[in-house]
Image (spheres, rainbow, N blue to C red):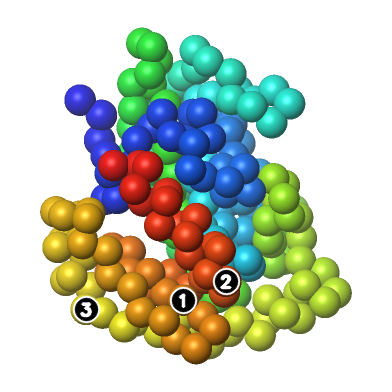
Amino acid sequence: MPLKLPINININALLHRRAVESERIEYKEGWNPEVILHTLCAFANDFHNLGGGYVVIGVTEKNGQPQLPPVGLMPSQIDAIQKELLNLGHSAIAPHFHPLTAIYEIEGKTILVLWAPGGETRPYKAKTSLSGKKNDWAYYLRKQSSTVKATGENERELMSLAAPRKKLFPRTWGCCFSMNIQKRFSRPLKSTWCIFLMGQVVTVSRKKSFAVHWGELHAMQ
């Protein structure tokens, strides 16, 4: 039986891009720590307030579409990846950030899904290289379906997000949410909407985006 993420993700929704925008999903054939670190940093910064994103490891991508059946990962690889993720979350991204992980078996192959929700202490920066020769850091964000360095106006706007996201609900309410996903908590704040997701408040700047989140949660049951 596969391990499930706390919001009961339907893996088919990720593998067929149902209910989740392409900007929020990245597929990787194998483990490339430097590239994936930058993507996780971008999802943590959640520049467009879409709720972070997902990295699916063990699935190739062609012309923006995941290719099935997946190439998969060996169990020993998954264990090593999870250990390295823990280390990178402490040493290569600041503030510290750790994605949630889940393991799935698809058509006889094992894949690893990383869920990186928008962080509570934005902005996040990551090491530009893990080679050890440099100690440069940069801010990353998502631009369409790509991860890019934040520069110019985008970097200035990202820096303005330095105030931590305010929690409107106790973290313990997360178990109530996971037990009955139909009980969705929402609260409008002027022009900004918030949804409660496993003890965190994910802000959404437009009602349209809020509707996307709402539909995503419904589709992923």
Q: Position of residue 48 (x, y in %)?
A: 63, 66
Q: What residue type is labelled 3?
A: Pro
Nearest to the observer: residue 72 or residue 182:
182
Is 203 positioned to the left or the right of 6 in the image? right
Residue 35 occupies quadrant: top right
Separation (CA) of disc 1 from disc 2: 7 Å
Q: Mark 2 points at which residue?
A: 206
- Residue name at image x 49 percent, y 29 percent: 15
Q: Mark 1 points at which residue?
A: 193
User: What SS does tag 3 mark?
Assistant: loop
Badges 1 and 2: C-beta atoms under 8 Å apart?
yes
Q: How crowded is mark 2: few (under 14 residues within 10 Å), some or many (20 or more)?
A: some
Is 123 positioned to the left or the right of 216 in the image? right
- Residue name at image x 57 percent, y 74 percent: 205
Nearest to the observer: residue 64 or residue 127:
64
Q: Taking the image as drawn, is residue 157 in sight?
A: yes
